[in-house]
């Protein structure tokens, strides 16, 4: 393969991509928006139930002492203050305590609290108040925590969103590359190149290089701007590079699916939606079924998540990266085959 | 402006548009995403903590847990399957009930229960589930609760469930995907193929052309908005008012589409705008998804004046009195957009001349 030819073709593609200054400007603006979305997202996770208390000092003090990792009791100055605190959201619920043993205790909830949450907190309070009154527990739970114990130090939503935004940036570039190839296919310039000394392999390599560099460059810049490279930068960059290669292969396939650029864009959005699904598993951990591991982007978001949010290195990520590399080989081979058969 | 010519153009748009993959996508995407949300994330969108149970002896605690609306209970064949589920985050807490568990409870002695806790579960969920298991076991053992609670509810506000928080994104997609893209791509493609030039040698006026393309986008947008609200069971709350809000939102979508179609030279530029500007359209939906983001952030985006009344009427049961300010702003934005399109029309005309 002639590296000079490949470099020239890749540079031509990059120039073509940004030839339209408006396009270049909005690409930069898009990156700014993604960064802005990240910084607007919540940076802390509120995982403690705060229950307000009002009543005799001794009873309030006893219950305040029963707080735990996920539960905190706070004294309110009066029943009115307690109700106001519940209504404005300072307390998830309130308890009006009294001196009479065995008498019902009033639990105060805001109308905005879902019924299920009211029931859950009521159960919690009933169990706790019962234990305080001397009722022995029916069961003793012997707990084993599986995986890293994040209680009290959960990953903030914006950090969980980071792999998804990086994936979106990479994927959107896929659409760009696919439409670019589609345009060349429509205009016949791809075929025209083959009457020059350029070989097919060089042509494909140049396209892959340009697409990967564009996708990786933007995703890496985004990660740098949102602190995604602060922990384990190298594994994050390697994962993004492998992800960029993967989407380049997918872009090759997409470019051959439609008759024209609009069809290619439409197909690209379908693929984008499917490839985004695993990112929801990072955003809402434990929410998606095991079959999302069949979606290749799972290994990209998982590796980026584990490296940037949990500080895992190559030793722990090798299986994700190996799968991603295998997917890259398959996607690029399939993409080149599709281009060769349908675009040239 | 002649209505007959506009109708003929709308029919032509519908005929050509119906063969476009983009139109099919604009129609199918919101429906597909509704399906995906319900299939893939259906259980995610419930607010209850998740309890897993591996029951070896037919304990009555299982039925009691399943009947408890404050929990989401999943059953597993054995302790290994439960452990794997807790490790994968499919449940927050899992308990293993051995054979003879209920009989052991009847002795009155505290029974040890093997429990698996997912490391990423929230501390609050662990606290709730621990208390719930204890209360359920006490119930199975036939014990009276140690304390009696009476409930008092204050305030009038109603909260949106997690599932409801995702719906604004769906509604925005349904209304803006087709409503904006169809007129925009139609105009841009006409420019690219030089068919605008050909159209203006006929008696057709630019106003009629824009009205026809806008009308088609508006109708598609309104149809998709109604369909998505129907599919998600939101149209029953105030159908007339909701359709009115959707109609105003559809004007915004079609207006933006026309403006982009007039201003942009080619589909590449349109794609670039979508790539960067799409997030601006959907930003209010992100604010709904994450209540910790201050709601004023959403007010900075045009589409919030459309989606806020939809949420208020469709999900919170509000009436016209609660949303009229947003509707006035939305209508004003529509008028401004229409005026902008009219002012910009010269660019398309100059191009065609």
Image: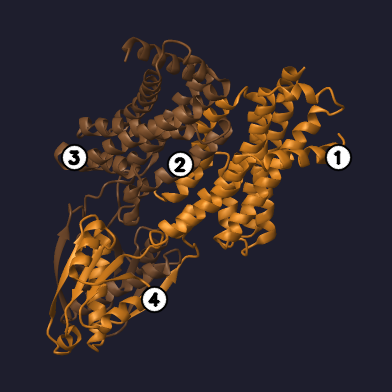
Which is more foreground, mark 2 or mark 4? 2
Q: Which chain is orange?
A: B
Identify the residue under disc 4: B151
Q: Is residue B285 above or below residue B347?
A: below
Q: Quadrant of residue A239?
A: top left
Asked if the residues shown at circle 1 and circle 3 are in contact, with their CB atoms under 8 angstroms apart, the answer is no
- Return the mark for residue A271: 2
Q: Position of residue B41 (x, y in %)?
A: 41, 57
The number of numbered discs placed on residues in the rendered structure image is 4
| Pointer 1 or 4: first along the chain | 1
Between tags 1 and 4, which lies in front?
1
Classify mark 1: residues with Cα within 10 Å, few (<14), some (14-19) or many (20+). Answer: few
Among the chains, which one is brown? A
Q: Is B249 left or right of B137, judged from the image as shown?
A: right
The residue pinned by badge 1 equals B3
Secondary structure at numbered mark 2: helix
State which tag comes first along the sequence, 3 or 2: 2
Depth order, front residue of A272/A255: A255
Q: Are marks 1 and 4 on the same chain?
A: yes
Label 1 residue SS: helix
- In the image, which is nearer the foreground, mark 4 or mark 3? 3
Q: Chain of mark 4?
A: B
Q: CA distance from mark 4 to mark 3?
A: 53 Å
**Marks 1 and 3: which is nearer the front?**
3
């Amino acid at each position: 393969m002639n590296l000079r030819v490949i470099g020239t073709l890749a540079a031509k593609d990059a120039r073509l991509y940004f030839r339209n200054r408006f396009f270049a400007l909005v690409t930069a603006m898009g990156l700014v928006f993604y960064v802005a979305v990240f910084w607007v997202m919540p940076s802390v996770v509120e995982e403690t139930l705060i229950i307000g208390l009002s009543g005799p000092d001794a009873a309030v003090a006893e219950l305040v002492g029963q707080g735990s990792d996920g539960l905190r009791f706070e004294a309110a100055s009066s029943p009115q203050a307690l109700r106001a605190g519940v209504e404005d959201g300072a307390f998830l619920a309130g308890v009006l305590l009294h001196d009479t043993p065995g008498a019902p205790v009033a639990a105060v909830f805001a109308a905005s609290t879902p019924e299920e949450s009211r029931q859950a907190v009521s159960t919690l309070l009933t169990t706790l108040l019962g234990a305080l009154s001397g009722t022995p527990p029916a069961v003793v739970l012997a707990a084993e925590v599986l995986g890293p114990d994040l209680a009290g130090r959960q990953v903030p939503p914006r950090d969980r969103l980071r792999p998804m935004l990086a994936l979106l940036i990479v994927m959107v570039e896929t659409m760009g590359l696919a439409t670019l190839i589609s345009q060349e296919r429509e205009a016949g310039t791809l075929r025209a190149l083959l009457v020059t000394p350029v070989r097919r392999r060089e042509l494909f390599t140049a396209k892959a290089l340009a697409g990967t560099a564009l996708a990786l460059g933007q995703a890496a810049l985004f990660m740098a701007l949102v602190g995604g490279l602060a922990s384990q930068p190298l594994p994050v960059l390697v994962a993004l590079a492998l992800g960029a290669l993967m989407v380049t292969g997918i872009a090759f396939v997409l470019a051959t699916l439609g008759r024209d650029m609009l069809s290619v864009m439409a197909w690209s959005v379908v693929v984008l939606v499917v490839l985004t699904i695993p990112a929801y598993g990072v955003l809402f951990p434990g929410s998606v079924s095991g079959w999302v591991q069949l979606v290749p982007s799972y290994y990209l978001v998982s590796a980026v998540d584990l490296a940037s949010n949990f500080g895992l290195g190559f030793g722990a990520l090798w299986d994700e990266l190996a799968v991603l590399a295998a997917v890259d080989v398959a996607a690029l081979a399939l993409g080149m085959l599709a281009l060769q058969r349908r675009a040239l | 402006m002649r209505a007959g010519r506009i109708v003929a153009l709308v029919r032509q748009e519908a005929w050509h548009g119906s063969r476009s993959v983009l139109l099919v996508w604009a129609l199918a995407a919101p429906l597909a995403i509704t399906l995906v949300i319900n299939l893939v994330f259906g259980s995610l969108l419930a607010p209850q903590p998740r309890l897993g149970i591996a029951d070896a002896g037919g304990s009555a605690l299982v039925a009691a847990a399943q009947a408890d609306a404050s929990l989401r209970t999943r059953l597993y064949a054995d302790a290994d399957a439960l452990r794997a589920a807790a490790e994968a985050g499919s449940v927050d807490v899992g308990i293993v009930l051995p054979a003879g568990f209920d009989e052991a409870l009847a002795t009155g002695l505290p029974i040890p229960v093997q429990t698996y806790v997912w490391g990423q579960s929230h501390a609050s969920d662990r606290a709730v589930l621990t208390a719930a298991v204890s209360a359920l076991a006490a119930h199975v053992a036939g014990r009276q609760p140690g304390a009696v609670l009476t409930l008092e509810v204050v305030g009038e506000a109603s909260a949106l469930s997690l599932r409801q928080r995702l719906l604004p994104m769906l509604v925005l997609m349904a209304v803006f995907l087709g409503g904006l893209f169809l007129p925009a791509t139609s105009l841009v493609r006409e420019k690219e193929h030089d068919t605008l030039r050909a159209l203006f040698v006929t008696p057709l006026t630019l106003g009629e052309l824009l009205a026809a393309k806008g009308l088609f986008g508006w109708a598609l947008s309104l149809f998709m908005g109604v369909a998505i609200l129907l599919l998600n069971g939101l149209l029953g709350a105030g159908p007339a008012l909701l359709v009115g809000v959707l109609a105003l939102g559809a004007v915004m979508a079609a207006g933006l589409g026309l403006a982009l179609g007039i201003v942009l030279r080619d589909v590449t530029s349109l794609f670039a705008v979508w790539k960067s500007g799409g997030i601006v359209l959907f930003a209010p939906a992100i604010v709904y998804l994450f209540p910790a983001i201050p709601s004023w952030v959403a007010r900075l985006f045009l589409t919030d004046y459309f989606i806020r009344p939809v949420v208020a009427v469709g999900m919170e049961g509000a009436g016209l009195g609660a949303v009229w300010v947003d509707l006035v702003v939305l209508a004003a934005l529509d008028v401004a957009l229409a005026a902008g399109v009219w002012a910009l029309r010269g660019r398309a005309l100059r191009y065609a001349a």
